[in-house]
Image: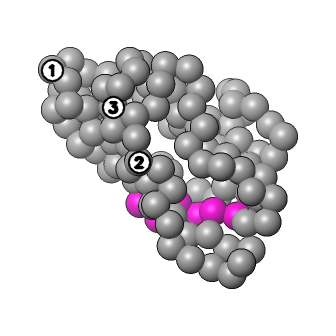
Amino acid sequence: MGNGIIVLYTGQPGITDTVLNTPNPNIKIKITAATVTNDTTTEKYITFHNVPAAGTAGDDNIIINQKVVGSRETLPLWELVNQTIPASGFLSAIAEAADQLTVHISAIYFT
């Protein structure tokens, strides 16, 4: 498969654990850029996990824990940049409110 640049995720995570990429046993993913935007008039928070193969989101794999995004604010997610998602692993997110925070994540993949 080689290497390449991808848009890993663009969307609005839900209030339950939302898987942001399709786990693949043949590739690893390294995040290169990430932002979150809050288009509402009240602050909201978001949490991210880097989950290993056959794992589940939990305290042991939190990357960002309840990051507050202010009203009408866009923030870089520096904590995600350079995170490597292992083969068969996945990135997940949990938002305080569904359909209110928009996340954009770019990455490279490699075998």
Q: In this figure, which residue is indicated by the disc labeled 2?
A: 10
Q: Quadrant of the N terminus?
A: bottom right
Q: Earlier in the sequence, mark 2 or mark 3?
A: 2
> Was residue 108 drawn as part of the magenta stretch in this picture?
no
**Closer to us: 80 or 102:** 102
Instruction: Please indicate, yes or no, whether residue 12 appears anywhere in the rendered image.
Output: yes
| Residue type indicated by callout 2 | Thr
| Residue type indicated by callout 1 | Thr
Q: Secondary structure at mark 1?
A: loop
Q: Nearer the viewer, mark 2 or mark 1?
A: 2
Where is residue 52? Give x, y as percent: 77, 45
Tell me whether the residue at label 3 lies in contact with that at label 1, contact meaning CB atoms closer than 8 angstroms: no
Q: Secondary structure at mark 2?
A: strand
Where is residue 19? Give x, y as percent: 60, 37
| Residue stretch rendered in magenta on the structure | 28-33
**Closer to us: 65 or 15:** 15
Where is residue 43? Give x, y as percent: 25, 21
Q: In this figure, which residue is indicated by the disc labeled 1?
A: 41
Instruction: Please indicate, yes or no, whether residue 78 appears anywhere in the rendered image.
Output: no
Q: Residue at x 55, y 70 (%)?
A: 108
Q: Is residue 88 left or right of residue 36?
A: right
Q: In this figure, which residue is indicated by the disc labeled 3?
A: 101
Q: Earlier in the sequence, mark 3 or mark 1?
A: 1
**Closer to us: 47 or 27:** 27
Number of residues whose C-alpha sits closer than 10 Å to that of mark 1, classed few (under 14), some (14–19) or many (20 or more):
few
